[in-house]
Image: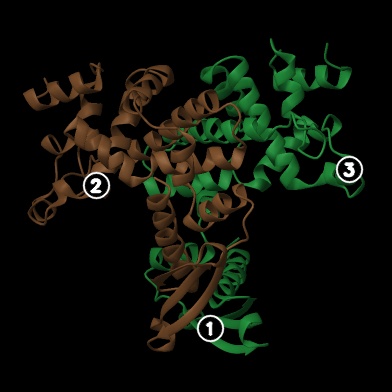
Chain colours: A green, B brown
């Protein structure tokens, strides 16, 4: 017989488990017991991916494969699953070992996101794909799939390039203006310039690529603020 | 009305399409038409992943998550899908643009593997997940999930380490013995030694890691030949 907390989690999931051991296991971290949620997470990860892929395929009929993949990666990333875990109040029922619990494991985004995947896997095993898929679609009910959100799912350099191309402008120029630190622990300082707009922004990162992305992100934010 | 070739592909898939346009699209490469198979491939990739995950979850009850993930990656990689494409004779029905066709596209493993994913996606849309899953399980009917095969799915360094640990032996020693070429185009020559067995093998690669893997692969082959 599940606890009161697990009962209300089932209400929030809108799924009453036939096999309550599956539910129990889904909220059990490996630090608590050998009967933990990692195999369920393995399964849930694939269920989530197919449910989200199907949703995107149906709702974004004109989008090419590359954009669909990017949107999917955006929706199933830790951030997004952590938000779902918060809505479901997963931390109320999470079972962690003492050490993990004391060091704040109940609030750790990775642990909470993994538990969401394990819960999806548990519902799939307890019922079938359609039931689990319907639940995943409820999780993403209000999700924003607008072109702006699609652009946000792109990396900043790509998004910036497409913004400029859409306005028939030249590509941005990236330049490394400084590297700091010893050979294997350098920080790169890169500037990104859009000459036609007289705009320059800087970005820092552990690699040239990361620094360029940071600079492009700042530049995009500046452009959006101007054009808001 | 599908062609004779597409009819026999349906027989091999054991699925008669209600919507034959889906089947047609699944075997159409982007070089042939704007109505090509890439969006179906996006969907099929996720269907394949869930079908294989479910099979592994059920058949390998004692395997931890990391091993399941490795086995899944091994089964859904291009090699494995290319083999399925050959069994299904996908190249007989593949529709390619002229240029791609002339340059041997019908035999290209990546194009054939992508078409298999697109076919899985098409069957899923034409019916449901259970039907598509049953088909994927037929594709992998005779697949070897033995411990030996599981070890093969691991990278060579990990497999070698586990082989040695299973026999209470010391870990192998890797040493870079030479680097050849200019700074950004170096080749590494690494030796891998198992002192207790008096064995040394070499490996070469574009990175230290790649060279170590190559050396471990050769050493594993030597060990297997000895212990066969």
Q: Which mark is residue A123?
A: none
The residue at the point 72 percent across, 46 percent down is: A110
Does residue A160 appear anywhere in the picture?
Answer: yes
Percent x, y of residue A136: 60, 28
Q: Which mark is residue B111?
A: 2
Q: Name the side, left or right, on which B37 lies relative to A62.
A: left
Q: Which residue is mark 3?
A: A101
| Chain at numbered mark 3 | A
Element assignment for label 2: helix
Residue B37: quarter of image: top left
Q: Which residue is mark 1?
A: A198
Q: Are marks 2 and 1 on the same chain?
A: no
Q: Are there few (<14), some (14-19), or many (20+) residues within 10 Å of tag 3?
A: some
Q: Are there few (<14), some (14-19), or many (20+) residues within 10 Å of tag 1?
A: few
Query: In this rendering, is residue B93 above or below A108?
Result: above
Q: Name the side, left or right, on which B203 lies relative to A179.
A: left
| Chain at numbered mark 1 | A
Q: Which quadrant of the figure contains the C terminus of chain A?
A: bottom right
């Amino acid at each position: 017989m599940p606890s009161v907390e697990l009962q209300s989690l089932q209400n929030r999931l809108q799924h009453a488990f036939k096999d309550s051991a599956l539910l129990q296991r889904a909220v059990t971290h490996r630090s608590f017991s050998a009967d933990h949620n990692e195999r369920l997470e393995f399964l849930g990860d694939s269920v989530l991916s197919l449910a989200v892929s199907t949703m995107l395929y149906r709702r974004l009929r004109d989008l090419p494969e590359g954009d669909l993949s990017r949107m999917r990666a955006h929706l199933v990333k830790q951030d997004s699953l952590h938000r779902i875990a918060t809505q479901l109040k997963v931390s109320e029922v999470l079972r962690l070992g003492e050490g993990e619990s004391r060091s704040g494991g109940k609030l750790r985004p990775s642990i909470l996101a993994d538990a969401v995947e394990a819960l999806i896997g548990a519902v799939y095993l307890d019922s079938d794909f359609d039931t689990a898929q319907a639940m995943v679609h409820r999780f993403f009910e209000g999700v924003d799939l607008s072109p702006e959100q699609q652009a946000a799912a792109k990396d900043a350099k790509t998004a910036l390039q497409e913004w400029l191309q859409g306005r028939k402008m030249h590509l941005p120029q990236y330049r490394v203006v400084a590297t700091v630190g010893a050979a294997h622990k350098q920080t790169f300082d890169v500037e990104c310039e859009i000459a036609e707009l007289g705009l320059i922004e800087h970005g820092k990162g552990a690699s040239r690529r990361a620094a360029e992305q940071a600079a492009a992100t700042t530049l995009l934010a500046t452009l959006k603020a101007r054009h808001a």
